[in-house]
Image (tube, helix red, strand yellow):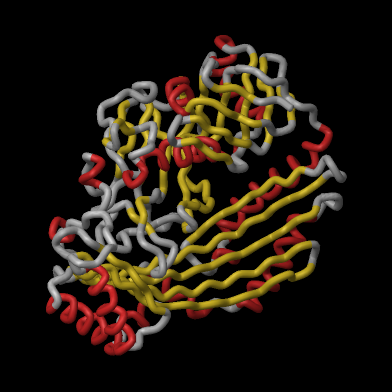
Amino acid sequence: MIEELERAEVDHLARRLLDRAAGRGVHLIWRAQSCGSWSALVRGGRIERVAASRFSGHALWIAEGSGRTAFASRDDFEPEAAERLLDRLIENVLPEARLRGSPLPPTTLAPEQARLVPDTAARFAGLDLEAVRLRLLELERICTAGAPKVRLRLAFGAELDSWRIQRSDGSDVRFSIPRCSLRLVATAGRDGGKHSVGAAVASPDPGLLWQDQALDLFFRRARHAVALAQALPDAPHHPAGVFPTVIDYALAKGLAHEAFGHAAEADGLRSSVLAREGRFRVGDRVGAEHVSIVDEPLEGDHAWQPFSPNGVRRRRTVIVERGRLRQALADAWSAAAAGVENTGAERAESYRCPPLPRMSNIRIEVATPLPAPGDFEDYDAEALRERLAAEGILRRHPRLAFLSGYSGGQVNTTRGDFVFQCKAIYELSQRGVRLFKPAIFAGSMFGALEAIREAFGPLCLDAIGTCGKWGQRVPSSGGSHYFLVLDPHPSFRLGGN
């Protein structure tokens, strides 16, 4: 896909537009995208969908000295039409025009020359959807063996997303983002008592369906999802109230992403609980002093993005450091107004969308985590109970509520209140383990971050999902240590029925 953006005629188009903008005294950010996607869906032993699609186009974002801006896009690379579009945009930002945008300081961006295309990008050319279809049917048969009353939905998705960004300062940035995922949803139960549990693995390699290591991990997660879906319809409801709580890395990712990540996006700081009068509250304490929240692009990760759609290298952003606010997720448009540095944190769903400050891989990190040997999948509820007992936590809390998995949620970033849903609840006590149906986990994000007492295991950062903001959807990922232990706190509770 990157080859389409490096053709001579595309080079010529970009140069014509940049020269034309310079002649009219405006700064131009030109971005082009070429994206291919492939997908297949299997349900109940039948193929429901096999699809392939591709789109490409480019966008113009201009600004003149007083801060007036304008944005537009085209679904082709036709030079004359693009020049006419640029001329109309320039007319919109002239001093007599009524359109007034946020100030853009393009001269503060460091010029960048870069090309970053992972080796796995070349393998998308050999992606065979017929082979994918047959392989998905085979994988579904393996997953359904021994579970006749469970209905499965198996989906494969692959995307090769390529960008090229040029600016009036001479910058020319090119990169490709390969991402693939294999997802399962297991559903069991009767009408009124159905429960669905998901499992997923991700990889930048389109050969994901034939990778032994990835499939071993997928089958471990799939078996757990199937067993849990079978057990949940007969499980009781957990009582409502305040409890000492254990959450796994997937729910911790939800807390970091929804509660702190969105609240730290600099374009929303006029109404964010993490700001005061629109300025990020750098230095304010928001959690326990051994807890940090970090956002960082990780190569090979499902949400990896090395550069912003403005051609700025994305930086590691420490949102919370040792319990205190440190950095916001900011871009060139929002950083100055919020009193923070530009961390190149913007993303865009496509070239048709203006870039917005967004997360990539976000996680909660705890200083000096306790050991949890082995893989995360080695820890069912009983193994986790034994680990808690070995570290003396069951002496401090004879009964804990273990919230397993993450099934979505929302946060009011103005007040800092969250409402999350887990996949299941286990009561862990000195007597043993008891399964309960999932329930709402709600309260104050500050209370939750303050209540984190211990962490177990290394960082596990492959909890994947999709993040929505202002009508744009982009891949997200993140996590934490295997498990976090939260002391009971009056600011958050389980909802029960």
149 with respect to 402 (left or right): right
- Residue at coordinates 52% horizontally, 19% vertically from top-left? 491
Residue 361 seen in the figure: yes
Quadrant of res 190: top right
Q: Position of residue 376 (x, y in %)?
A: 55, 39
x, y (%) of residue 138? 73, 66
Give the residue at x 64% y 15%. Answer: 399
Name the residue at 55% across, 77% down. Answer: 53
Q: Position of residue 263 (x, y in %)?
A: 40, 38
Q: Is residue 279 above or below residue 114?
A: above
Q: Between residue 141 and residue 117, name the one nearer to us.
A: 117
**Total number of numbered discs in the rendering:** 0
Q: Quadrant of residue 152?
A: bottom right
- Foreground pick, 244 / 388: 244
Spot the residue most to the top.
Answer: 395
Q: Position of residue 201 (x, y in %)?
A: 56, 54
- Kindly identify the residue that appears in the image at 27 percent across and 59 percent down: 100
| Up/down of 195 relative to 57, above or below | above
Q: Is residue 417 left or right of residue 148?
A: left
Taking 302 as reference, is 5 above or below it? below
Q: Quadrant of the N terminus?
A: bottom left
Residue 164 visible here: no
Where does the C terminus fall, quadrant-wise?
Answer: top right
Looking at the picture, tell me which residue is in the foreground, 90 or 22.
90
Q: Nearer the viewer, residue 331 or 460?
A: 331
